[in-house]
Amino acid sequence: MEPAPDSTRDSLGGGASELPQLAASPSLFKRAWRVLLDFWIAPIRAEPLALMRIVTALGVLLSALTTIAPNLSLFWFDEGIIPAQVSDQMMSYGSRASILYGVTSHAAIIAWFVLWMIALLFLLVGCYSRIACIIAWVLAVSFNIRGLWTLNGGDDVAVHLLFYLMLSPCGAAWSIDSLRRRLKTYRDPESGFELPQARPTAQPTLIEPWSVRLMQIQLVIMYLLNGINKMNLAQTNDYLTGEAVYWALNDATLTRFAFDMLPAPMWVCRLLSWATLLFEFSFVIFICLPRVRPVLLWAGVLFHAGILATMEIGWFGQFTLCYYPVFISGAAVAGAAALLARRGSKKKYVVCFDTFCPVCRRSKFALELFDVGKRLTYLDIHDRPAMEAALPGVGYTRALREMLVIAPSGKITGGFDAFRTVMRVLPALWILLPVLYLPGAVWIGRRIYKAVARNRYKLVKCDQGVCNLHLMALSRENLDEEEIARVVQGARDAAMHRT
Amino acid sequence: MSDASILKSVPRYKRILRWLRIALITLFILWHLTFLFIANAKLYTDLTSATLGKYERYTSLDQGWGMFSSPLYRVLPFPAVRVTFDDGSSEVILSSNEPEDLKYFFRIGGARLRKLEHSFITERADLTGDYRQPIQQRLAQSYLDRWKAAHPEDARRAVKFTLIRRDFQIPRPGESWADEPVVTEKELASFAVEGAP
């Protein structure tokens, strides 16, 4: 979807200031209709959904690895506590479906589990997000149904999250899919030369909001129903009397530790019982108010963290929190991501790159896409005075041969090591970082880097004098300064002329 | 170029496809919202059960939220299995989820086993002739396997399982857990050990 100029719309449909046309609407009905339409169709920023995709995929992955993988033989294998035949019969009686229907082979169950984990990894990094999400959802349902008697509320919420993500364009931002899309938009300058300044920040990606709205409605319903069920007035109500938290903390079938180890005074139990009710109903009523929303979301985080600390009830709270990003505005999520990416530091790393090299220009474009915190600045290696000032004593020949990175501390790294430095600076690439630190990675990496760097002008069409200069640099240790200045100036002039 | 002229420049089939997509999405949203309302308000009828109910079950979008609903448990039910051996002696094997000391324990994990055990001591426990009976059988067998691993020297042969529920009364507010809390045991079901004579 094409980004609109006003792309900071709130994820719940925007406040009055963002909907100036409403004020001019003549009737209440028209206004209400407009708000309703806006809620369902006005484009919203993709970052909150992307964050939800990441936390959901990570959550389901961790949950499956910690609670299903160690229990495969106990609950999911045919010889375990739940025989395949019983599970299959339950599916027939209960109109349930599972890929594991009739599967008794251990190898097959393990293979499906591994495929599920791979799909979740793809979903996590946003690679073929939609397909990965469909596979992850189908397998989540299948493993849930096969182990039906072992399910906690968290397993249900996980399936719901994957279902809604499957409907949504969850790979629109912060994903390999979006990176691929943006790289396709890259156009190498016709002049064959690019000034080293960073490109202007791309407009945020906008998405259709309807799937996000369904997610928001689902969470509101969850809290509403939980609240209503707590208000059961048929018998003595533990929440109104304020005893609910006391009884819950004493339920030794599911508490994390004995009540006597940390006995909460009754007044604390009462406050927490009433706060629970207050939170669940407030969430339903006030979540649409942008000013109150952050308070409610933080209260929810504390609420679920408290339950996690005191109760062993699976992943219900953690998965419920996975819905929260879609209640945060896109601008806030993007701002927080930039802040985290900077990690409190405003110090910049300088990347010295060959402005005449098409491969290098494309790499710089890719780096800019990952550089959410704007930690990188760029320097043209052909700008000799600037290079002399930034890298005294480093020869032009070396700069031509490999990418150089200057850390804020002044440390200079080149080639493959510079590549690793840049990866460390950009959190979006951390997922690949362990690969670069595997034993032997330096030996292999340096050789691959050198091969690519040496041939970078052969990989693409280049008909400028700079290409010859590069080839000469590879064949000779030192080049004549006048020759360099002449070639670079000629190439720059030609590029400027073309521009 | 005006909006109208831009629209005219879009091929007709593309416009039809776009409207078809919008119509399908709208229908799906209406369907899903109806489902959320019916499922959560528990308003299933024969018709809605055959349509929306199937949608709920096949997609595993189970609704009906009610975590820690009132009234909360006053009694803690833990399962246990009494194993009768071929010499007539018996052993009661407790659930691994039951703390040795209710006044001092710490727990990480085990939520899946707890859930499974819970569903077989709170639902109708005597599952004779029920398709779920093998689960009860194997659950009891898993207790015995755990016990045998701890007592490898014991040569007795198990012949019968008796599923038991052990209930502990939670002390009222202001009271505290007794050093040895009173436990009430109730036999839920008995069945022969698989392969026993």
Image (cartoon, coloured by chain):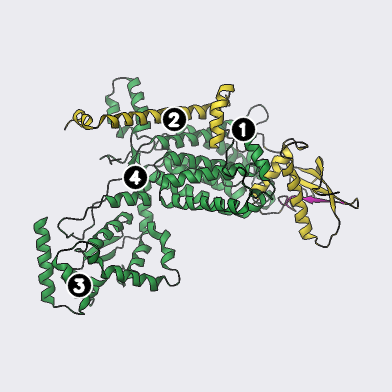
Residue at (84% x, 60% y) in the render: B154
Chain shown green: that is A
Instruction: Write down the residue under mark 1.
Output: A240
Where residue B28 is drawn, which disc sits there?
A: 2
Callout 4: helix, strand or loop?
helix
Mark 2 → mark 1, Cα distance in angstroms: 39 Å
Amino acid under disc 1: Leu
Residue A181 shows in this picture: yes
Q: What chain does mark 1 sit on?
A: A
The mark closer to the camera, 1 or 3, is 3
**Is disc 3 on the same chain as disc 2?**
no
The mark closer to the camera, 2 or 4, is 2
**Is disc 1 on the same chain as disc 2?**
no
Could you tell me residue A490's position as x and y percent? 9, 66
Q: What chain does mark 2 sit on?
A: B
Q: Is residue B136 above or below residue A412?
A: above
**Is disc 4 on the same chain as disc 1?**
yes
Amino acid under disc 4: Ala
In this view of the protein, which residue sits in the foreground, A258 or B146? B146
Q: Which region is colored magenta?
A: B90-99
Instruction: Write down the residue under mark 3.
Output: A471
Instruction: Write down the residue under mark 4.
Output: A331
Q: What chain does mark 3 sit on?
A: A
Contact (CB < 8 A) between labels 2 and 1? no
Chain shown yellow: that is B
Figure quadrant of residue A392: bottom left
Choose the circle earlier in sequence order: 3 or 4.
4
Mark 2 → mark 4, Cα distance in angstroms: 29 Å
Indicate yes or no whether the magenta region holds residue B97: yes
Choose the circle earlier in sequence order: 1 or 3.
1
